[in-house]
Structures are given as structure tokens and as C-alpha cells.
Image (tube, grey):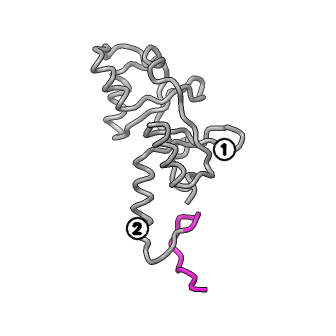
Amino acid sequence: MFVSGFMVPFKDVLKCEASSTVKDVLNLMMDWQVSSLVIVLEDKPTGIITKTDLCWCYQNNISLETQIGDVMPWTAGMKKILLTADKDACAQFFEKHNVHHALVVDSNDKVVGLISALDIAKEVARDARAWPYNRHEDGKAHAIDAH
């Protein structure tokens, strides 16, 4: 199964502006029960803010009224993965880069979605439930061809 089959499409990703406060971001994450937001400028991604980043803010006594853009240097370095990567390659990418979230891009480097470690875990669980069938790129279980 390719990442494109289980990522969150970019249009559905929760976003915030760099001018959003730490408190705004925290409230959005709690209200929507998500672990990250994509920071955008004119609908173009400029960063990803995660619960880990918010923990860093807390540990460093960053005010809740601080703008996320002022925290950005610490969170710089958005990771991107191709939408044609499979779940195993995505998991290896996360391990290599020590991240839990990445933007999903097409072959033209256009952002098309967001993927998280939890998305991969859910996909692995779906595969396990599909046994003894194989799941194909369309996400559906198909009988194993004995030939």
C-alpha cells in the first residue's frame, strides 16, 4: 500500500498561520485530537508544529501568547516523503530522520498530504486484520492467488 492510500489529504490537514499563538495551536490540537498542525503562509507549508514542539515550549517556559513563527527556528526542517513510498519505506524514513510526521509530496514536490507514525500503525493493523487475504494499493483485501 502506497502512502497516498492512507495519508491525510492536504485539503483536510489542520493548518495554522505563523502568527497563531502557542495557545491557539494547543487548543486546535486538543479540540480536533490531532498531534500536529501544518504552519502555512498563503496556503503553502512553512513548517509542522507537533505536540513534542509544544512540550519543548513548556519545558523552556515559552509564553502561551508567543507566536508559533517565533518558535519556528526550533521546528525548522520539514521532512517530505513521496506519495509513491510504501508503508515500510515510510517507517524507515521516520526512523532514519527521527520524526513522527512528514509532508507527502508528488513527483513535482507539490504537497498533497500529511502522514504520521500513527497512520502507518493503523495501516499495519488493517493489513493484519486482512489476513489471509492480501491488501492491494486500492486498500481492499483480495484473495491470495495460489498460482
108 drawn magenta: no
Query: Which residue of the protein is positioned furthest toward the right in this rendering?
Result: 108
x, y percentage for residue 39? Answer: 50, 27
> Of the residues shown, which amino acid type is indicated by label 1?
Asp
- The reply, left or right, for residue 7 in relation to residue 54 is right
Query: Which residue of the protein is positioned furthest toward the bottom in this rendering?
Result: 147
- The reply, left or right, for residue 57 in relation to residue 136 is left
Cα distance between the residues tagged 1 and 2? 28 Å
146 drawn magenta: yes
Q: Which of 140/90 is in front?
A: 90
Magenta-drawn stretch, dominant element (helix, strand or loop): loop
> Of the residues shown, which amino acid type is indicated by label 2?
Ala
**In the picture, which quadrant includes the N terminus?**
bottom right
Which residue is at a point 50% across and 23% down the rendered structure image? 76
x, y percentage for residue 74? Answer: 44, 20
Residue under label 1:
106
**Quadrant position of residue 54:** top left
Numbered circle sitting on residue 60:
none
Count neighbours of disc 2 (C-alpha within 10 A) and say few if under 14, some if 14 to 19, many if 20 or more: few
Residue under label 2:
128
Work out whether 45 lies above or below 61. Answer: below
Which residue is at a point 43% across and 28% down the rendered structure image? 49
Circle nearer the viewer, 1 or 2: 2
Please provide the residue range marked out in magenta: 136-147
Work out whether 63 lies above or below 8. Answer: above
Mark 2 element type: helix
Count neighbours of disc 1 (C-alpha within 10 A) and say few if under 14, some if 14 to 19, many if 20 or more: some
Q: Which of disc 2 and disc 1 is earlier in sequence?
A: 1
- The reply, left or right, for residue 43 in relation to residue 29 is right
